[in-house]
Amino acid sequence: MKAIFKREIRAYFNSPIGYVCVAALLALYGFYYFQVMALGSTSYISAVYSTMFTFCMMVIPIITMRSMADDQKNKTDQALLTAPVGVTAIVLGKFLACFFVYFVASTLGLLPAAAMNFFASPAWGEIIGNYLGTLLYGGAMISIGVFVSSLTVSQIIAAIGTFAMSVFLMYIDMLASSMSNPVLSTLVEWISFNTRYTTFTQGMFSVSSAVFFLSVVAVFVFLTARRIESRRWS
Amino acid sequence: MVEVKGLTKRYGQNLALDNVSFTIEEGAVVGFLGPNGAGKSTTMNIITGYLSATAGQVTVSGKSILDEPGEVKKLIGYLPEQPPLYQDMTVKEYLNFMYELKKTRLPREKHIQEICQLVRIEDVYGRLIGNLSKGYKQRVGIAQALIGNPPVLILDEPTVGLDPKQIIEIRTLIKNLGQNHTVILSSHILSEIQAVCHRVIVVNNGRLVADGATDTLAHDFSPEHRMLLRAEGPEQELVAAIQSLEHVVDAYSTGEKEPGAFEISIEAEPDADVRRPLFRLLAEKGWPMLALKNTDLTLEDLFLRLTSGAAQDYAAQEGPEEALDNTEEQAPQRKEEDE
C-alpha cells in the first residue's frame, strides 16, 4: 500500500495534473477569501467554504479520473495484481494518494486565513470546522471517483462519470424540496452531501455527518476492491 | 514446482482453456507454444493469479493460488505480454517501486544493481521508461520480474518486437536464468523454443495438444522417419545395397547432386536406427559418404501439423498423459547431453 501511495503521489506531481488541481483550488480559495476581506467581516468565512464546496466537487473528478483507469489501460495493473499485495491495499493506496492531493489543496487553502490572523482575529473555530467538513466530503467524493475510475479504461469517461455523480450529489437536496412524499425527501436529504456538509459551515462538528462521510469512503473503497476482484472472473 | 490441473477458463460463451493439465519440475525451462489466441497468455495469467480459472487448480511449490495468493505470488516473477511499465517513471524509480511492492527483503541497492547488470540496463538506469526503445522496455520488464529473486519465472513472449541481436541476447539471458530458476516461456516463434527450452507444451484452441522434450517431440510425431544420404558411387548399386540393409523400408535416388554423387532418400522402420549399418556398408564398398541428414519434421512442420487438426487425432489416440510420461523420461537425458 505504501509503495503504491508513494508512486501515485509522484505521478501526480511529476505531471502537471497535481499542480493544476492544487493551483486551481488555491486560486479560488484566495479569491473568495479576498472578497471576505473586502467585506470586512469574518462572519462571511462560511460563505467561502460553501462556495468552495461546488468547486471542490468539480475538481475532484479530475484528481480521481486516472487513478484506476490508467492502470487498466496501460496494463500496469498486471504488475500490481500479480504482486503479493491485497486488492484492498491497492485501492487504499490509490485512494490515499488522491486524497493527499486534495488535502494539500485544502490545507494550503487555509493560508489566507492565516494571513488574516496577523491583522484581525478570524473565527478559527468556524474555519477549522469548515476545513474538516471540506476534507470529509472531499474524501467521500474521492472514494466515489476512484470507484467510477475502476469501471472504465478511459480517463475521460471516468471524469465525466464522476462529475455526473458529484453534480447529482450537490443538487440532490433541491430534489428533496420538490418531493411531496416525506419519507422519500427525508431519505434524499439524508444522503445529500450538501445538507450533511452545511452543519460544518455553521462551525459545528457533526459526528453523524462525519460518520456518514467516512462510511461512504469505506463502502466505495470496498466496492472498488470488489470491482477489481470481479475483473479476474470475467 | 508448478502444477496445473484441469484448468478451464470461459469468457462468456467462449471457451479459452479446456481442461489443461501439466506439471513442471523444479529447474526446468519449458516452452509454451501455440498460435495467437491459443490460450497461452490466459494460462500464464491464471498461474500468476491475475485471472481466475473457471475450473481447475494451480499449485506452486505445493501452495494453491486461491488459498494462499500472497505466498504464491512471492514465488513467481511475471513478465506479461505487454510489460507493466509506468511510462512516467525512470528505470530506477520503477525498479525501486517494484522492490517495495513485492515486499522484498534482500539488500535493496545491491539486489537492484545485480539485476540491472544481468539484463544490461545499467546505462539507461536514470532514464524515463517512456523514452526507452522497445528492447530496453522489454528488459526492464524482465528486470521487474527478477526482483525479489523468485524461484519461478513466467515470461510471456519475451522477445516479441525485438531486433535479431536483442533476441539473441534475451535468449542467452533466459538460458542463463534457467540454470537457477524454473522458467515458463511462451512464444509462437518455434526456433526460440528450440533454442531455449528443454521441453515444449503445445496448446491450440485452449487445449493441450502435445507435451514433450523439444528434441524428441518432432521425432515422435513424424509418421515416417526419413534420412537423406549423399554419397559418391554408382547410383543403381547404391540404392540396391541400401535397400537390402536390415530395417530399411524404402530407398530411392533423388538424382545427381554433385558430379558423381547421388542423393538417396531412405526410410527406416520407426524404432530402428540404420545410421551405423549404413556407414559400415558404404565404408566396405568404398563409397564416400558426403552427407547424412535427418528429415524428421522440423518443429515448424510439427507446429503446423499440431495446430491444424492432425494432432487432435494424436491426442485422442494416445492422450496427453502418455505424452507427459514421455517427457519425464526424456528430459533428464537431454540435460545430460547439454552438459
Image (cartoon, coloured by chain):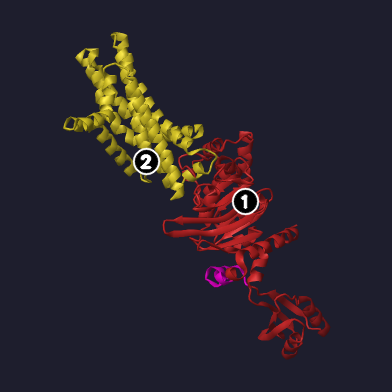
Q: Quadrant of residue A154?
A: top left
Q: Is residue B88 above or below residue A109?
A: below
Q: Amino acid at mark 2?
A: Ser
How packed mark 2 is, by other alpha carbons closer than 10 Å (few <14, some 14-19, many 20 or more), is: many
Look at mark 1 in the image and give the residue it sits on. B2
Residue at 57%, 72% in the rendered image: B313
The region drawn magenta spans B297-313
Q: Where is residue B260 drawn, in percent x and y?
A: 72, 86
Q: Colour of chain A?
A: yellow
Q: Is residue A134 above or below residue B263?
A: above
- Image side of residue B214 versus residue B137, left or right: right
Magenta stretch encompasses residue B309: yes
The verdict on a common chain for dots 2 and 1 is no
Look at mark 2 in the image and give the residue it sits on. A149
Q: Amino acid at mark 1?
A: Val
Q: Where is residue B165 drawn, in percent x and y?
A: 59, 56
Q: Colour of chain B?
A: red
Q: Is the stretch drawn in magenta largely helix, strand or loop? A: helix
- Any part of residue A76 in sight: no
Q: Quadrant of residue B212?
A: bottom right
Q: Chain of mark 2?
A: A
Q: Where is residue B228 drawn, in percent x and y?
A: 68, 78
